[in-house]
Image (cartoon, rainbow, N blue to C red):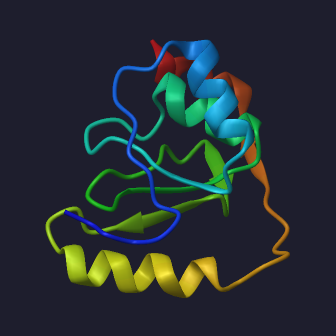
Amino acid sequence: MLKKQNVYKFINLKRSEALKVISQSKYAIVSKENNLSFFAIDCVSHGLHIFYNKNLKLNNSIKTNMYTGIDFNDLGYSIKKIDSLIGNKKKKYFFKAYTKNFLNYLN
């Protein structure tokens, strides 16, 4: 179990509650199985930097620097990577999804 200051784990929130937490956050870790879940899309829409399972590849119709792959099977490596990126402040984030290909991805 992680015991870090300002790190919180939430389970089974209603969407309205999740959006409140997201709006107060800077970073999120998305589930191991889906890096484009509704939660992840809500995080992107609020400008959060997202850490995702590096074994899942982002669809090539998506161009972004808001996603960083971490190794869900190596906690030490992942914590080091997250800590190093949290120190980088004031970075401009972008998320571009090429609509035609992205809509095919969602099917």
Q: Is residue 23 above or below residue 69?
A: above
* Residue at 68 percent of width and 23 percent of height: 100
Disc tally is 0
Please indicate whether residue 21 sits to the left or right of residue 9 in the image. Answer: right
Picture quarter containing residue 49? Answer: bottom right
* Residue at 47 percent of width and 75 percent of height: 82
Q: Is residue 2 above or below residue 8?
A: below
Picture quarter containing residue 27? Answer: bottom right
Of residues 9 and 67, the one drawn nearer to the viewer in this rendering: 9
Of residues 52 and 60, the one drawn nearer to the viewer in this rendering: 52
* Residue at 68 percent of width and 41 percent of height: 44
Image x and y of residue 33, in percent: 26, 38
Picture quarter containing residue 103? Answer: top right
* Residue at 53 percent of width and 48 percent of height: 60
Q: Residue furthest left?
A: 73
Please indicate whether residue 6 sits to the left or right of residue 12 in the image. Answer: right
Q: Is residue 46 above or below residue 16?
A: below
Please indicate whether residue 75 sits to the left or right of residue 92 in the image. Answer: left
Image x and y of residue 38, in percent: 52, 23
Of residues 26 and 40, the one drawn nearer to the viewer in this rendering: 26
Image x and y of residue 67, in percent: 56, 58
Image x and y of residue 77, in percent: 27, 83
Q: Quadrant of the C terminus?
A: top left
Q: Quadrant of the N terminus?
A: bottom left
Please indicate whether residue 83 sits to the left or right of residue 63 in the image. Answer: left
